Image: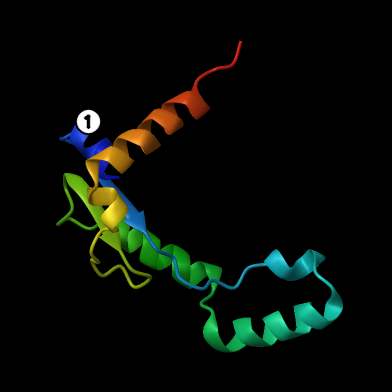
Amino acid sequence: MKEFASRHPTVSFTHVHPGFVATNFKSNLPWPIRIILGAVQMFFARSCEDCGEWMMHALVDSTTKTGAHFTDPDAKPIKASPYAVDTITRGVVWDHLVAASSPKI
């Protein structure tokens, strides 16, 4: 996010950490694991709808007009990862993203 923001200073970039969301990721697992994960999801995970609402809240926040922003599952600002601040790591990740998204001929 910080690299995108440095390259496009008039745009806002937000990374939302969604937390534990109840999805169907367990559908192809063995049945005992599905039962255990289903119980864990029931008590500790938030619904996809709730997660989506909080993510939209973070994305349309009027205080984040430009720059890089990082939020927790409840759309509250959090500190960026140390890797996001390190310019060498940012450069390596940027180069990888450019190479990975370039058309292969």
Q: Is residue 75 visible?
A: yes
Percent x, y of residue 39? 67, 87
Residue marked by disc 1: 7
* Direction from residue 80 to residue 49 in the image, left or right: right
Q: Is residue 60 visible?
A: no
Is the C terminus in the top left, top right, bottom left or bottom right quadrant? top right
**Label 1 packing within 10 angstroms: few (<14), some (14-19), many (20+):** few
Q: Nearer the viewer, residue 104 or 48?
A: 104
Percent x, y of residue 34? 77, 78
**Residue ID at (70%, 82%):** 38
Looking at the picture, does residue 76 appear above or below residue 4?
below
Q: SS for tag 1?
A: helix
Q: Residue furthest front?
A: 88
**Residue ID at (42%, 26%):** 98
**Residue ID at (31%, 52%):** 83
Q: Nearer the viewer, residue 30 or 83?
A: 83
